[in-house]
Amino acid sequence: MPSAAQNSAARNSAAHTIENLLPSAEERLEQMIADIQRLVEVETPSEDRAAVAAGAAETAALAADRLGTMPERVVVEGATHLRLRFGPDKPKVVLVNHQDTVWPIGTLARKPFSRDGEALRGPGVFDMLTGVVMSLHAAAILQAAGHDLTGLGILITGDEELGSQTSRELLLEETAEANAAFVMEGALDTSLKIARKGTSMYTVAAHGVAAHAGLEPEKGVNAGIALGLLLPQIEALGDSKLGTTVTPTVLAGGVTDNTVPDYATVEVDARATTVAEQDRVDREIRELTSPRQGARVEVVGGINRPPMERSAAEGLFAQAQQVAAELGIGEITGAEVGGASDGNFTAAAGVPTLDGLGATGGGAHAEHEHALVKNIAPRTALLAGLIAGNLD
């Protein structure tokens, strides 16, 4: 059992660590911005496996530069992910990141990395390359201060924007023994995400009968009309009182302009705050039938991410508020949001999870994507404090 003197020394050491985190992060700010630019300028659209692999190589090199350790490269079904562990065992604290983006190759040519004084801009700068750099520098700050990083893991995946189809098992394996998962997604303000809706993704198809639109349209069954009649039914599966949304999005159908279409589809985005609501929507969308005589409905897809319920974040959120107060960086509030992340998976697996620790800014997946410079250092210091507090 530690002596009273040892306990006192540990408290003094922790206080000293907290005291120096913000100045250390501020000293690193220009280097962090240069590192963000380094990653932004390697375009990594999720669907392009070669591009994601190139981005992973650059990210791994950056990690080695900042931390002196090369991450392990993990390739699953052609998608490249990075895993960095400090120590031989499964980590107790995991920083959850992704370096794939929604932006196609060539975006950088018209939308290069830039800094206008207040904001950083460029494809993926907010979602979520700034968060990746913050992860590496938070660990580096502690390392430089002599903090033992044994038990820390940093995961940087390459298919989060596709639903983490190849990285989900890796994520759950890496966090299986963790007492904290910190998800480096961005936030619109200085709040942290303490709850997220679960997501489901479907393709609803209407099958009809093709016919010549001019000679004998009466012999066809128009799949486009059948699908159109289904759209209000699909939307009605939502429940605003419970926060459930079911949204038809991408529509497609038809082959030629003189043919009655025999096939039409709609992509459906469904989000819910509880597992029960996810299950209800899943059941009811599969029970849809067409009001158009002769048409048939097919539904493929299903539940992708379970909800991240508030209970998973409450303990870590209280810690974050305390660390923020000790750092003097202002009040930290909690937000419940509709968007999903890999935090949904870790929370559903019973791992304490706090999300939204990355950049502040906005415009994820949009032309005005940006990360605010003023909050990069304070939030990196906050992350470092949370890591230290959960490794001790």
Image (cartoon, helix red, strand yellow):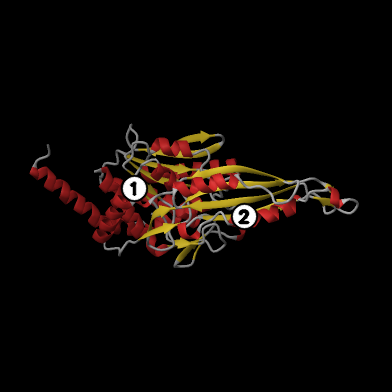
Q: Is residue 81 above or below residue 32?
A: above
- 295 vs 96, nearest the viewer: 295
**Horizontal arrangement in the rendering, residue 47 relative to residue 2 (left or right):** right
**Horizontal arrangement in the rendering, residue 134 relative to residue 5 (left or right):** right
Marking on residue 140? 1
Mark 1, secondary structure of its residue: helix
Q: Residue furthest right?
A: 215
Mark 2, secondary structure of its residue: helix
Calculate the distance from the C-alpha at mark 2 to the C-alpha at mark 1. 53 Å
Instruction: Say which amino acid is labelled 1.
Output: Ala
Q: Residue 212: x and y, percent?
A: 87, 49
- Residue occupying image coordinates x 39% and y 59%: 335
Q: Is residue 253 above or below residue 157?
A: below
Q: Decide: few, some or many residues near mark 2? Use Cα within 10 Å; few <14, some 14-19, many ≥20.
A: some
Q: Are marks 2 and 1 in contact (CB under 8 Å)?
A: no
- In the picture, residue 156 is in which quadrant? top left
- 70 vs 236, nearest the viewer: 236
Quarter placement of the C terminus:
top left
Q: Residue furthest top?
A: 88
Which callout, 2 or 1, points to the residue nearer the camera?
2
Q: Residue 292: x and y, percent?
A: 73, 51
> Do we see residue 71 in this rendering?
no
Q: Residue 31: x and y, percent?
A: 40, 55
Q: Residue 81: x and y, percent?
A: 48, 39
**Horizontal arrangement in the rendering, residue 134 relative to residue 78 (left or right):** left
> Do we see residue 210 in this rendering?
yes
Q: Decide: few, some or many residues near mark 1? Use Cα within 10 Å; few <14, some 14-19, many ≥20.
A: many
Q: Is residue 121 above or below residue 47?
A: below
- 378 vs 234, nearest the viewer: 234
Marking on residue 233? 2
- Residue occupying image coordinates x 50% and y 45%: 279
**Horizontal arrangement in the rendering, residue 286 relative to residue 207 (left or right):** left
